[in-house]
Amino acid sequence: MSTLEQTAVRVPAAPAPGAAEPRRRRRLRPTQWIGVLFVLPASLYVVVYQLVPVVYGLVLSFTEYSPLSRSGPEWVGVANYFALVGDEDFGRALAVTGQYVLMVLPPTVAIALGLAVLANRPFRGIGFFRSALYVPHIVSLTTVAVVWLWMYSPNGLFNEALTGLGLPPQSWLLEEDTAMPAVAAMRVWKALGSNMVLLLAGLQSIPRELYEAASTDGAGAWRRFRHITLPGLRPILTYVVAMDIIYLAQGFAELFILTGGGPLASTTTVNYLIYTEAFQYNSFGSASAMAFVLFGFIAAFSFLSIRGIAGRRS
Amino acid sequence: MSAPVAAAAPARGPGWRGAVRGGWPTRLVLLSATLLVLVPFAWMVSISFTPEEQAFSSVSLLPAQPTALNYGHAVTDANLGRAMLNSLVVTVVPVLTNCLAAVAAGYAFALLPFRGSTALFYLLLSTAAIPGSVTLIPLFLMAKGFPLAGGNDLAGYGGTGLLDSLPGLMLPHLVMTMNIFLARQYFTTANPDLAEAARVDGAGELRIFTAIYLPLSRPIVAVIAIFTFTGVWDDFLWPLVITQSPQVQTVQLALAQFLATGTVRYGTLMAGAVLATVPVLVIFLLNQRHFVSGLADGSVKG
């Protein structure tokens, strides 16, 4: 209880000294308890359903466990992790995941940045552009993938366009060469709007005076972009790239709908492999190990990208 | 703290005044980009009104003989009637719990600090960076072993727990760490003098929160409600993992399931896609301002 009183004393003293003092102190003690009470439901929940699962998952990754078996998890030490090192499927899935991120991230950020620069001007109807471009972001990956499944179908939009141009139709999602780029194209389309809105918010936090000063000093459009816009965008760009990496590296629903991880595992990402390993082959232990390796990669790459973009300044 | 304000209302930010006026080339590029982005949705709607026998082969943006039959099929054959209801229940409950628990917690972290509250806040916040695949399997086992549910005993053994049930679908979404963060950021910029004045007048803490700060916090409550709604409504992997029976299917799952059964019926499928999209689209259009500002808040602030 002494801790509570200690903190209570730190609160600015009452204007009237003497008689008011003890009463005030008494009233502030419940304040602290009420703070605890306010925080309690949410904190308890987050600890039980967000933090405990991480520890639980880590423990599982050192075990062999099938949810169908009568016995509980069986401790196997780092065997699951060692097995992953030589596992071709896992290595392939890691490569596919990296490929997916690399196919989606650079075009998305580049196009979104271009659109944001264009949209950072006042004219009638700009709100419409912003909202319309944002719509793909709020629609679920499942729904969006269903629509693109039709667009890639034999008589879908893309093949109709090809035939219209006199080119042979493609079986986009069924060929090893085209399946991944096809899914990636959908993801670029979906991520464009949210990236643009964030970058636009970043653009508008850059003081206008900087541009005016640069213009009067005779700096051209490119130099203004290079020396004012890009440095000013750094914080938000860091955030956008890190978030993109985190989301893209966990791609699942779109692949489930569009390709089912195929053809020939060419679109089986780590997350997809974790799903099949855990819920089709019932190997909870090795699936957990995969999840933690993926976690490590995501953490490392987001950290590197943050350092790469924002690091030089700090 | 002017940057967050600018970010929260991009259209009125300081960068707006005196900006270069957008010429026709700019508008043209933006317009074509917007049209390109909206094309898939146009086809989605169009095919949903195209008779099924034509939907497989024909491609015409305006169906020659528009029909609403596909929507009936989506509701019955693709189980979307039941699934919409399930999704609504499974989504609305987390929206309410997030608005209550996450907002209360964010408020206390900002304005009713106690010893260790900062450390606790950062501990909770750290979970926001954990990928869903890490917690998927443990959460599945925790849902399965939920005490006294689905035939389980007090220790969580013997039954199926919350697997294949609506409460199980809600389980991982009841409080999202990001929402606590957003609420805290919001209340950090609120005026603490209001509470101080009310305290001097003898108002209780609960009253100060409900009568003074909660009404002020409507924008952030809206953002939290919207984020939670779209997040839970759009979720796919968790429902896929913990449900089996059609009675508890969510919308996204019903779509995927319908796709997996036999030949693809694009007319019905697109009608289902439209139905799955309408709720989030309505929420978005009604709250565009909050939506975009909330997105920016989560990143620029903090």
Image: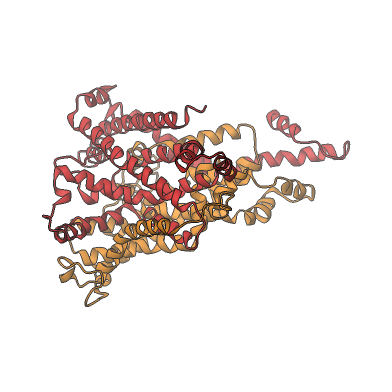
Residue sitting nearer the eye, B91 or A44: B91
Q: Pick whichever, A288 or A76, lies toward us.
A: A288
Expressed as whole percent of the image width and height from the top left, the position of residue B107 reads 61, 45
Letter of the red chain: A
Q: Position of residue A140 (x, y in %)?
A: 34, 54
Whether residue A22 is situated above or below residue B39 in the rendered picture = above
Residue at 16% over, 65% down: B56
Q: Position of residue A190 (x, y in %)?
A: 34, 51
The answer to whether residue A156 is above or below residue A279 is below
Q: Is residue B267 visible?
A: yes
Quadrant (top left, top right, bottom left, bottom right) of the N terminus of chain A: top right
Q: How many marks?
A: 0
Q: Position of residue B162 (x, y in %)?
A: 35, 48
The chain coloured orange is: B
Residue furthest to the left in view is A168
Q: Residue at x 75, y 35 (%)?
A: A11
Q: Residue A151 or A270: which is nearer the viewer?
A: A151
Choose top left, top right, bottom left or bottom right for residue B120: top right
